[in-house]
Amino acid sequence: MSLRVTLFKFAKEHNSTARPSVSGDVTHVTLKDTTSFLNPILELQTATAATNPTGWNYAYISDFKRYYFINDWVYNRGIWEAHLMVDVLASWKEEIGGSTQYVSRSSHTYNGSVYDSTYPALAKISSQGSNLSPNPWDNNISLEEGGYVVGVISSDRNAVGSTKYFYMKQSGINSLCDALMDDATWLGTDFGDVTADMVKAVVNPFQYIISATWFPFTMPFLPSSRVLRCGWYEIPSVSCAPMGTVEYATTSNVTIPKHPQAPDRGSYLNCPPYTHYILNVGPFGEHQIDGREIVGDSSLTIYITVDLMSGSANLQARGTQSGTVVLNATGQVGVQIPLAQASNSLQAGKNIVGAMGVVSGAAITNSPAQGLIRGISGAIGYLESITTGSPMGKFLSNVAASPTTSALDVPVVQELSISGHQGSIAAFQISPGIRGYFYEVAPEDNKHRGRPLCRMARISSIPGFILVENPELEIDCTEKENAQIIAYMTGGFYYA
C-alpha cells in the first residue's frame, strides 16, 4: 500500500499537543505487510543505501489523519524502514482543546487561595510588623501625657448615682493634691488660734474622692479652673472638666503584613501553617489571629471602648474589607493612681485639746491656758455644727465635752488616707500593632508542574501545562487512543 507521508525534524515534549509549524519533506512510502496503523512500519520507496533519513524524527500521514513519532530507522536489504508510533495528543488536538474539563493544575492561570502542598515549607522564617494608626495611646506615653478621671461624691448634677466624674490633666491633679496635702486655707474660715493640724484632723474632704484613674489618651474634654465640690466641702481653683459621659471610644487601623512569596505563589501562603499573626494592643495582651479569616483583607480595624468609671475596656478587631470579627478581648486600660491626704488621726483632735490641758500628766485647772482651750473648743463646736449628725460631728462633741483628757491616753499620730492602688503603665510603652511570621516555601517549577486551579475550564483557553481530574472525552478515535489521551491528561500534558 503506497502512502504520501510528510517527514519533519521536530523537537517536542512527548506529552504535548504541539504540531510542526514548518513545512516538512513529502515523500512516498509503502506500508509494510502485517502492520498497525497506530504503530505502522513504513518503507521509504525513494531511500537507498546512499541516503540517510535518520534526521527525520516526526511524521504526518494524511491518509490516516494522524501525527506520529518516529521511534526508529532500520536499514533492511537496501530499504530504510521507519518504525512509527501515533502521537494521540497532536492527532486529536482540536478535540482535546474543545473539551471542558476539571483542571486541578495549570501553568497558565491559577487560584491562589488553594493550598499547594506540592512544595514543602523550608526551615526559614522571616517576620514583618506594622503599627496601629492612629496610635490609640498618646505618643511617648508617661503620666504627663494622657489624663485622669476622678470620681467624687458630689451634689453636682449629672452624677452617676451620687458620684460625679471629672477629667483632669496633670495640672489639675497637681492642684488637687496641693489642696489635699498642703494647707486648709481653702476652707475660707478663720478658726482663730486653732492650728492647721487641728483643722486637718477634723476636715477630710478626701473621703469623698472615691477613685482616680489615669488613662493613656487625651480625651475630648477641656479642663478649666473651677470649684471642685467634695461632699459638702468645696475646693477652689482645680483645673478639671465635668464629664457628661463615662464611655470613651477610639478607632484605629493596622496594615496586615503579607507573606513575601504570596504575590507570586498565592494568597494561601498568608494562612497557617505558612503564616502566623500576633496582634498586640497593650493591656489587651497578645492574641494569635488566624490568617484564614483575614486572607482577603489588607488591614484590620481596631475598635476600643473604655469604661471611664472602672477603667476596663473592650477591644474588637475586624477585617476592614470583609468585616469579619477576628478578635474580641477585654483589658484594663485605666491605671489606678493612689491619691492621699496627709492628716492627723481623728484622735489627734482630742489629743491636741487634751495636751493643752495637761502638763506632764497633770490637768491644768487654773491657768491662762484654760482660755485657749475654751477657744479651741469653740472652734471645734463650729466644725461640729457644720457636720451635725455625722460621725465627725459626734467625735467633735466628745472632744468639746472633754477638754482635759490626758495626752497620754492616745498618742498623736500622723495618718495617710489613700484611695486606689498603684497600677502600671508598662503595657503602653510598646507600640500596638500586628506582626506576621512567615515560613518560606521551596522554589517551584511552574512550567512543568503548574499551580492549583481547581475549576472547570475549556482546555484551549489555558495553554501550557495542564493536569485534569477524571477527564471525559467524546472523540471518534480508537479505544486505545482514547485511553492514551486520558492517561496523558490525568498525568499532566501540555496544550500548545
Image: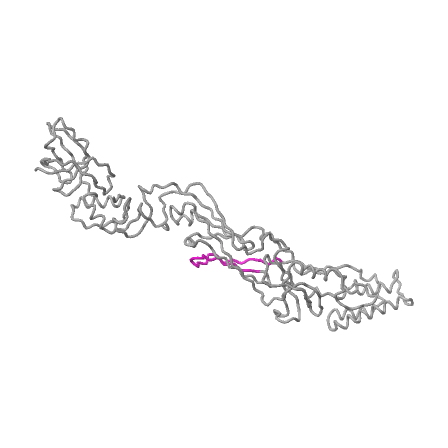
Q: Position of residue 347 (x, y in %)?
A: 78, 64
In the rendered image, residue 361, in percent from the top left (x then y), is placed at 87, 61
x, y percentage for residue 460?
Answer: 25, 48
Q: Work out whether residue 242 or residue 282 is closer to the camera in this orientation and state it.
A: 242
User: Residue 323 location in percent, x, y?
Assistant: 44, 59
Q: Nearer the viewer, residue 194 or 142?
A: 142
Q: Horizontal placement of 103 versus 318: left or right? A: left
Which residue is at the front of the view, 117 or 89? Answer: 89
Q: Residue furthest front?
A: 23
Write the residue at 47% across / 50% down. 277
- Left or right: where 108 falls relative to 403: left
Q: How many marks?
A: 0
In the image, the segment drawn in magenta is 312-335
Name the chief secondary structure element in magenta. strand
- Image side of residue 285 versus residue 478, left or right: right
- Whether residue 188 appears in magenta in the rendering, the answer is no
Q: Quadrant of the C terminus?
A: top left
For the N terminus, the quadrant is top left
Tell me which corner region of the image, top left, top right, bottom left or bottom right, holds residue 293. Answer: bottom left
Magenta stretch encompasses residue 318: yes
**Which image quadrant is residue 488 in?**
top left
